[in-house]
Amino acid sequence: MNMTADAPLLAADGVPLAVKLKRAERRKKLRAALLVAPLAVFLLATFILPIALLLYRSVENPEVPAMLPKTVSALAGWQGQGLPDEAALGVFVQELTAAKDNKAMVGNAAKRLNMEISGYRSLLTKTVRAMPLDPAAGPLREQFVNIDERWAEADYWRVLRHQDSRYTGFYLQSSLDIKRGADDSLHMAGDDEAIYLKIFGRTLWMSAVVTLFCFLLGYPLAYWLVNLPTRKSNLLMIVVLLPFWTSVLVRVAAWIVLLQNEGLINGALMAMGFVDSPVQLAFNRIGVYIAMVHILLPFMILPVFSVMKAIPPTYMRAAVSLGSHPIPAFWKVYFPQTVAGVGAGALLVFIMSIGYYITPALLGGPDDQMVSYYVAFFTNNTVNWGMAAALGSLLLIATMALYTLYARIVGANRLSLG
Amino acid sequence: MSVASPDTDVLVSFRGVQKSYDGENLIVKHLDLDIRRGEFLTLLGPSGSGKTTCLMMLAGFETPTAGEIRLDGKLLNRVPPHKRNIGMVFQNYALFPHMTVGENLAYPLKIRKLPAAEVDAKVKRALGMVKLDKFANRYPGQMSGGQQQRVALARALVFEPQLVLMDEPLGALDKQLREHMQLEIKHIHENLGVTVVYVTHDQSEALTMSDRVAVFDKGEIQQIDPAETLYEAPVNSFVAGFIGESNAISGTIEHVDGDFCQARLTGGGSVSARAVCVRQAGQPTTLSIRPERVMLGERAVGCANRFDATIAEFIYLGDHLRLRLDFAGNSGFMVKVPVPEVDPAWQVGNRLSIGWRAEDLRALDPLAA
């Protein structure tokens, strides 16, 4: 065995070469870090932080624990039958009395409890107003039932007992149509109560349809563009990109004008005698599909085009010279090489589709709304940040799951976003 | 059946073939060409000379604007490319990147619906032929350029076509590898007896490999001959200049006498030369001589043509020395001298007598200035 082979290799000044190299590399890495630092800070502040907050909001549950911290822990010993014992009720009275002047705190807690059982809001405010109670005036149980008969029902206490944590799965469960039963077990909501799973399914289905149509329309176009002389293909590329430079809102409005019952398309169809009465094209699924495919088509064409551009025509020629008819040669030789572009385009279109809001909102009917519509509904109309954040988080998770699935099947390194 | 009774030795024949892309310019002007069975024919020419277009018409990727192409006596014009059964090797290899080497080779066999066992045997044999037995499961992207080109070669041969076309197949390789592959292709051709039509713009490649070379320029075949004839007896000044190196001297014909002629040089003096493209006195001409045919000093004594020239530059190239001479108003007159024959007394500025035999100087058509 050669001893010198084990000794570390030294640089000219006697410092081990590996150490020297590391030092040189560190300087390079530091410079790279400095160059991306402004962008990293910007992204952190405008992208990563809001998303983290959104995810946090979907499980945050501060309202009741803030107002009744001792009550919820006192209720932990309650058996779930009848009313809680006098000691627990005493803590409850103390905390209710203490919160009496803090209207905002009471309001928030009441709103939160009202999400669990409708009517809880009035119950709580009414009870707060009746505070304080005199323990000498008889058992607190009776006094509570006297304020409102609903306090005799175990359900209201059960809901209160569940507010023992600052975190809750309530919003996420609700977003997936999961309900908590009287025995505290989780179960799927019945058909009459279930809403969100259907909406998630609809969102995914509509996105899939839009992606499919973008592929069916975009792929042949990209192929044609690639095979044109450069001058012509550049010109036509501008035409493809033209819609990019118009606001989505304007384009949707234009589609409304075109597609509505008195619109240009129906007018032309009737004038030519194809139909007697207008075909319903706007404010239903068809209108949403037409506008979404139109808006998202460039996102399919561009990656497919750029991948096709890199495939020399000799591949097809080679396949044909080897004896293959041009059509099977296309599927066996050309198409597999474009899969990366198709995958990238499909992923782009699909992910953008599942977050679509304005187009279905303006061009669709009530049954064509996607998840984003309900996110907007909860933030704008009911100011229920928990539900909005939960729906948004699930959408994000679905997107990431799909991306992972795609990366597994096609391979993320083969993804070519153009 | 007077025209159609084909010479059994001829595999491919072009008759009056023309090709135009824009309806105004002919990229192939008028092509009559017979390719013999089993021969290695190279189409050589500068880019834009129409050689690749000819190959593409033969492969079926371009249709002739006029004329007919026959393969084995059968008219090809209306046969689609995938039914021609012609192997083809492309410059960028065109190996299918999503298939392994084995799958690439099996592709033409599977299209022909050969039984799996036969496909395997043929793929194995083809890989052995190009010495890549162990690479069947590699993807083309994992191989070097030379290996990929060998796979492309094997793929074009694996379905045993009677004709293989090669479109500058070695253009992307470095010089050393290219020279190695030239010999390898030549040996494969010799072993298989397949007919090869090879397109290149590299004249040394053409000379190394071919049985015959067709020199293309401006959409026409300028000369088609074996390498030696092409080099030693170019029929016009384009071929003389394109193949190898030659000194071009302009002059005017004084008189023609059978195979030989007398010409007056533009820079002064008179020479006798072999009359190739000249017919009568008064014609302008370009006289062409190979640098290695010029004799210097005492060796020039007794030559039919003798002149004095001035040494302008020495260029040392190891095995031989190149002398640039000022002669007859021509400052780029090159002479090749094997190193042992160099006289150590020669220096730049010396006067030197030069000379050559009349049959080594060829009177050709005047070169456009």
Image (cartoon, rainbow, N blue to C red):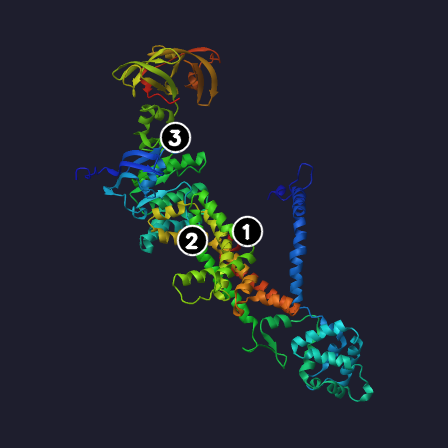
Give the quarter of the figure containing the N terminus of chain A.
Answer: top right
Query: How many angstroms separate mark 1 from mark 2 (CA)?
Result: 23 Å
Residues at marks 1 and 2 on the same chain: yes
Residue B104 position within the rendered picture, expressed as x and y whole percent measured from the top left: 39, 49
Residue B360 position within the rendered picture, expressed as x and y whole percent measured from the top left: 33, 18
- Identify residue type, mark 1: Trp
Circle 3 SS class: helix
Q: Residue at x 70, y 77 (%)?
A: A121
| Pointer 1 or 2: first along the chain | 2
Pointer 2 residue: A220
Circle 2 SS class: helix
Query: How many angstroms separate mark 1 from mark 3 (CA)?
Result: 55 Å
Mark 1 Cα shell of 10 Å, populated few (<14), some (14-19), many (≥20): few
Pointer 3 residue: B204
Q: Chain of mark 2?
A: A
- Identify residue type, mark 3: Ser
Front position among marks 2 and 3: 2
| Quarter-of-image position of residue B245 | top left
Is residue A64 visible to us here? no
- Between B13 and A139, the one lying in front of the other is A139
Mark seen at residue A245:
1
Mark 3 Cα shell of 10 Å, populated few (<14), some (14-19), many (≥20): few
Q: How many numbered discs, if any?
A: 3
Residues at marks 2 and 3 touching, judged by CB atoms closer than 8 Å: no
- As displayed, is residue B46 above or below residue B90? above
Front position among marks 1 and 3: 1
Mark 2 Cα shell of 10 Å, populated few (<14), some (14-19), many (≥20): some
- Between A78 and B18, the one lying in front of the other is B18
